[in-house]
């Protein structure tokens, strides 16, 4: 499967998991695709539903994709902008990054948001309590070399075309508002911040929100799939067996790059929780039994080749 990568980057992006997620949705039928947490939009843009409601509490993500939809931002404009701003970044030996960050926090320009997304440290998307983007520079003054600019430009063009082919509505709103708009004929793909792990998101996430999301999805009577984590080498996500105990589970091993060193690239068992039986899913009780008996937690995919994953890049 060819994966269309969005131009906006953030840690936790599902680029490496899109094929797995998509294969578990191939036989599903629905009238509208709904995402309460669209994030970078990578899943929706690859599934390419005919109609979609894509929402997020981060206003900058929604503003950016609305700008692509309206034609305010084009691939040509992005090439020109990143070429000019990249030269300033290089001449300043990286200090210009902080000028752009200050400008973005004041003016909220979606092109500045793209610039920061692709030149901040480790692709993080972090904001302070006042809503200001506060991630430091990646320490690569030559960040916007021509090859990367071309890559980003192509990504903008691809995603713009996908958006233009569909009937997509983008909304900046809290997930609770999105839950109110769900119809029983919709399909919901939910990718909330991962509870119990480092949160790289516009808002925080707690057990309270997890329970509200669970009740909202169940009460909607719509089909849904939720992305979360099942376990890593240190612990298990107990919420899978309490809040989501009625759901089916399918799993895959994945590596996340959450720091600057190889030691911080750790394996996680990703989980898709659903109220419908997927190709390789098992019951919640069977997975719990596997963990208790120290049996394999994988339901569908073989383990990754670890050396290849250590080369994982967010570019």
Image (tube, rainbow, N blue to C red):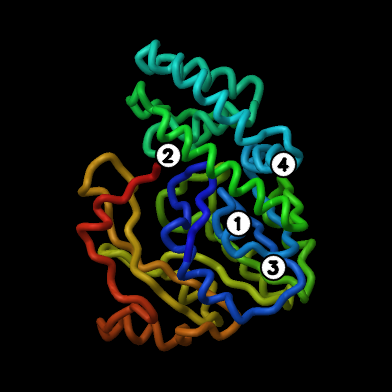
Check disc 4 and report its element: helix, strand or loop. Answer: helix
Q: Position of residue 148 (x, y in %)?
A: 42, 35
Mark pair 4, 2: CA separation: 22 Å
Q: Nearer the viewer, residue 155 or 183?
A: 155
Q: Position of residue 149 (x, y in %)?
A: 47, 32
The residue positioned 44% from the left and 63% from the top of the image is 17
* Extreme residue toward the top, this view: 92
Q: Which is more foreground, mark 3 or mark 2?
A: 2
Q: Nearer the viewer, residue 161 or 192?
A: 161
Mark pair 1, 3: CA separation: 24 Å
Q: Which residue is mark 4?
A: 66
Q: Is residue 228 left or right of residue 255?
A: right
* Tag 1 and tag 3, C-beta contact below 8 Å: no
Mark on residue 123? Answer: 2
The residue positioned 77% from the left and 57% from the top of the image is 167
Task: Determine crowd level at label 1: few under 14, some 14-19, many 20+ residues with C-alpha closer than 10 A.
Answer: many
* Tag 3 and tag 2, C-beta contact below 8 Å: no
Mark on residue 216? Answer: 3
The residue positioned 34% from the left and 68% from the top of the image is 253
Q: Position of residue 151 (x, y in %)?
A: 46, 40
Dot 4 or dot 1, earlier in sequence? 1
Depicted 49 relative to depicted 138: above or below: below
Dot 4 or dot 2, earlier in sequence? 4
Please state the total of marks drawn on the protein image.
4
Q: Which is more foreground, mark 2 or mark 1?
A: 1
Check disc 3 and report its element: helix, strand or loop. Answer: helix
Q: Which residue is mark 1?
A: 45
Mark pair 3, 4: CA separation: 26 Å
Task: Determine crowd level at label 4: few under 14, some 14-19, many 20+ residues with C-alpha closer than 10 A.
Answer: many
């Amino acid at each position: 499967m060819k994966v269309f990568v969005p131009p906006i980057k953030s840690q936790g992006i599902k680029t490496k998991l899109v094929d797995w997620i998509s294969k578990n949705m191939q036989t599903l039928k629905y009238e509208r695709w709904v995402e309460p947490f669209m994030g970078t939009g990578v899943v929706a843009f690859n599934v390419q539903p005919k109609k979609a409601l894509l929402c997020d509490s981060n206003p900058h993500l929604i503003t950016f994709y609305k700008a692509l939809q309206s034609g305010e931002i084009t691939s040509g404009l992005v090439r020109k902008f990143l070429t000019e701003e990249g030269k300033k970044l290089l001449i300043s030996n990286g200090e210009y990054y902080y000028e752009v960050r200050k400008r973005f926090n004041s003016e909220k320009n979606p092109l500045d948001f793209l610039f920061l997304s692709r030149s901040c440290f480790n692709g993080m998307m972090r904001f302070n309590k006042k809503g200001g983007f506060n991630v430091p520079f990646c320490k690569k003054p030559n960040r916007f070399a021509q090859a990367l600019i071309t890559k980003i430009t192509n990504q903008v063009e691809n995603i713009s075309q996908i958006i233009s082919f569909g009937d997509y509505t983008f909304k900046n709103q809290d997930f609770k508002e999105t839950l109110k708009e769900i119809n029983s004929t919709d399909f919901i793909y939910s990718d909330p911040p991962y509870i119990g792990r480092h949160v790289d998101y516009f808002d925080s996430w707690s057990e309270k929100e997890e329970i509200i999301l669970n009740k909202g999805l169940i009460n909607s009577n719509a089909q849904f799939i939720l992305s979360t984590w099942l376990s890593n080498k240190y612990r298990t996500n107990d919420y899978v067996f309490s809040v989501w105990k009625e759901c089916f589970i399918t799993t895959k091993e994945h590596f996340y790059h959450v720091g600057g060193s190889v030691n911080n690239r750790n394996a996680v068992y990703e989980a898709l929780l659903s109220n419908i039986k997927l190709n390789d899913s098992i019951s919640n009780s069977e997975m719990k039994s596997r963990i208790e008996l120290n049996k394999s937690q994988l339901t569908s995919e073989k383990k990754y080749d670890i050396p290849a994953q250590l080369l994982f890049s967010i570019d």
